[in-house]
Amino acid sequence: MRLPVLASIFVILSGAAAGQTPKAAPRKATPPRTEWGAPDLRGVWDFSTLTPMERPQQLAGKEVLSEGEVAAFEKQALEAIDLDRRDGGPLIDRERAYNRFWWDYGTKVVGTRRTSLIVDPPDGKIPPLAPEGQKRASGPRQRPVRERLLIGAAPDGPEDMGLSERCILGFNAGPPLVPTAAYNNNVQIFQTPLHVALLNEMIHDARIVPLDGRPHLPSAMRQWLGDARGRWQGDTLVVESTNFTDQTGFSGSVLGRGGAGENLRLVERFTRLDADTLRYEFTVEDPTIWTRPWSASIPMKKTEGPIFEYACHEGNYSMFNILTGVRAAERAAEQAARKGAK
Amino acid sequence: MRIKPCGVAVLVMAAVAAPVLAHHAFSAEFDASKPIKLRGTVTKMEWINPHAWVHVDVKKPDGTVESWMIEGGTPNTLLRRGFTKNSLLHGTEIIVEGYQAKDGSLKGNGRDLTFTDGRKLFMGSSGTGAPKDGKDPTETKR
């Protein structure tokens, strides 16, 4: 754990990390508790937000928006990502996919008005890749492909397509949870004295987190979602995950920085601040991939359920259509080549 | 609302950086060089994940009927907003603008789904903060 580094940042960010430092602001309300006395994290939580994971280059050095800037930022952010607009030309228009009413991304920035969800490093950016991380990010395509189908790639079969396209891992579900998808940014938390279950709406996976202090799985056992163990640290649930695979489609790769590796150690922290707010923080350590650890802080809002079953695999006609599209293009190319040879 | 120029430049770029990801890249499935505009009647709506599909029968000028399948987004979003299986009934006449599937079959993405009077299906873009394209008569002028 790298609390000293985190703490120094949190001191700078007033109110961003109540509970992490002795100087933290007092909480607004006593968080609810379960029948057995634990902090109550149960319910459906919405982690959508307009605040980007990484601080945009144009806002370099500007950690927090002023109150006056928030409305303009939100308005312009919504306009920029609006999917009803038709002004992009065919290539962009097609990628905007379908009407706004299908989408469910955030419409507000986080309450701290930070310009990035990443709180460490202080520049709000995912740190540079380590040499091995660079190699993996730039190397030949691996199977299974960690993330989305590359534009222009021609998959031979489903195995050549991204993990999210294959409905194996969600593109916001992580772990860690990140609001990088434009819908299904919801997680439902279940709790017993001995377990916590984290049910993410995207791809519909549940992570079962034992709280009984048992050791991690043997290191030879690798899992898509890692192997999670939880413990209470004061009123904060700390979930530590290891035993990831080197194929994990960690959402960081969506941000263009390569996937997470087999040495990933992920520490997530869930703190119920009040009736409507759950603070979610995570720290990623993977020296194989990144030159240093990095951390983010994402407020989750209580929302009415239920979580809907995503059942992605069952109705995945898109997989069929993409593959038939590639085959049709190959047939057309063959015919053109034969015609040219005559 | 007026915004100071420097703020606009900075903040627009910031907004562009916010990711908007769907389940798959539409460039892999649909052909940008084959735009479609169809007027037809809904024969079925498949409320399935990861993408809902609207089936539409389109009558051609020669009287024959083509049956199209149109891809939308996740039904989860619509369910959360209170829409149900009865929200788009068999026989409803709609207009579809989109792009045809790369394999040449009668499938397309529902880039823009409207009723014949121009109203967007389900809920218009009103109130989303989106720029107004004038297609939704319920939009408030600003």
Image (tube, helix red, strand yellow):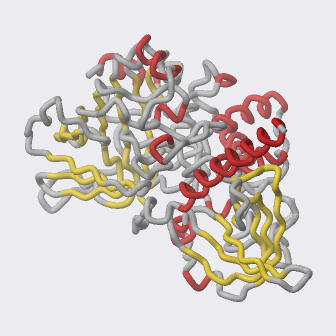
Locate residue B15, reporting x and y percent. Answer: 68, 38
Image quadrant where one finds the N terminus of chain A: top left
Question: Is A8 placed above or below A141 here?
Answer: above
Question: Is B109 placed above or below A143 here?
Answer: below
In the image, B21: left or right of A293?
right
Question: Is A134 placed above or below B58 here?
Answer: above
Q: Would you say residue A45 is visible in this rendering?
A: no
Question: Is B89 placed above or below A272 here?
Answer: below
Q: How many marks?
A: 0
Q: Nearer the viewer, residue A54 or B35?
A: B35
Which quadrant would residue B57 be assigned to in this image? bottom right
Q: Nearer the viewer, residue A321 or A209?
A: A321
Residue shown at 83%/82% (left/top)?
B59
Looking at the image, the residue that sits furthest to the front is A342
Image quadrant where one finds the C terminus of chain A: top right
Residue shown at 61%/18% (left/top)?
A61
Which quadrant would residue A92 be assigned to in this image? top right
Q: Would you say residue A246 is visible in this rendering?
A: yes
Residue shown at 24%/32% (left/top)?
A242
Which quadrant would residue B55 be assigned to in this image? bottom right
Locate residue B136, reporting x and y percent. Answer: 82, 69
